[in-house]
Image (cartoon, rainbow, N blue to C red):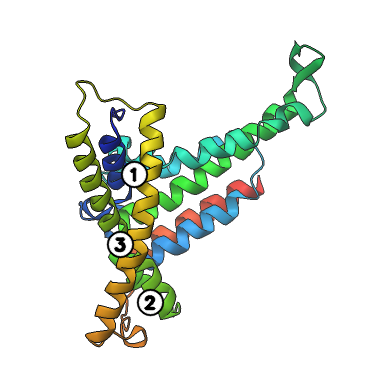
Amino acid sequence: MKVPQSLRDLVEGAESLVYIEDLSGKKGLMQTINPLAKLVAITSMIVISLFISSLSYLALICLVPLILALTSRIPMEHFLSRTALIPTFAAVISLPVLFLTSGQPVFAANIGALNLTVTMEGLTRFLVFTVRVWFCVSSLTLLILSTGFDKMLKLLSSLKVPPVIVQLFSLTYRYFFVSVHEAQSVLIAKEARTYVNKKTINLQSLKDLGSILAALFIRTYERSERVYLAMKARGFEIENSNKLTMPALRIRDVFFASSLIIAFSLLALL
């Protein structure tokens, strides 16, 4: 994974992480499965994983999204980069469990008057929580990458999700790229006026990014009002925008979902 060297690289990286349509158009296993079957299977996998407390079993089920991603021709670099942030944050916030759980000591350190002891039980709870979070995130990421945003909206609409929620997701996703392109234009203008020979991400550049985001937030709010008024002037109505139906389930779709659900259920009962 390429490390961003400038603010523009950072913004472009954020855009590439959100864009999913190219991956959903590839010819792979998950792309050929009915979106409803994928939703049922992955939702069941996530729910059942909450009842699996064995670290070895959790590590085993983590192979499932990886294998499905490979068979769906989703590049591992893209897949892992999209599934790293939230589990990393979960690992950070669960660090106190290592020291607050009583049990068999594994590691001890004295920092001044503070005595920190890592126990085996605390380490196990920490790993179980982090691995479970990664599995849930990777499963949802696999669903979105293999389905595509438009088909996900169509699926939500066919499941009778309120149209206002579907439209909210749609406008948020579409407008994200407008905001990113606007940020890129601002960054290009800034670099053209404050050119230096070597551009790297440092504390000052992050401060500049904060001021740029603040200005963009105001411009985005004003632009969203103009866009909405323009849409209403052209006859846009939320109630009539999502009358869509999904294709019928096939035998392979039912077999795919049921086999995963049965396998995970048996694993949870062990």
Residue that appears at 39% across and 34% down: 206
Report which residue position mark 3 lands on.
175
Percent coordinates x, y for residue 144 in the rendering:
36, 56
Amino acid, disc 2? Ser
Compare marks 1 and 2 and give the one earlier in the sequence.
Answer: 1
Residue that appears at 59% across and 53% down: 48
Q: Is residue 100 left or right of residue 40?
A: right
Residue that appears at 42% across and 28% down: 203
Compare marks 3 and 2 and give the one earlier in the sequence.
Answer: 2
Amino acid, disc 1? Ala
Determine the secondary structure under disc 3. helix
Determine the secondary structure under disc 2. helix
Q: Is residue 239 left or right of residue 136?
A: left
Compare marks 3 and 1 and give the one earlier in the sequence.
Answer: 1
- Find residue 157 and name its label: 2
Distance of label 3 from label 1 (alpha carbons): 28 Å
Residue 199 shows up from this direction: yes
Q: Residue furthest front?
A: 193
- Find residue 69 and name its label: 1
- Find residue 230 and name its label: none
- The image quadrant that residue 92 belongs to is top right
Which mark is nearer the camera, 3 or 2? 3
Percent coordinates x, y for residue 204 in the rendering:
38, 29
Residue that appears at 44% across and 37% down: 84
Given residues 110 and 68, the one toward you in this image is 110
Given residues 237 and 225, the one toward you in this image is 225
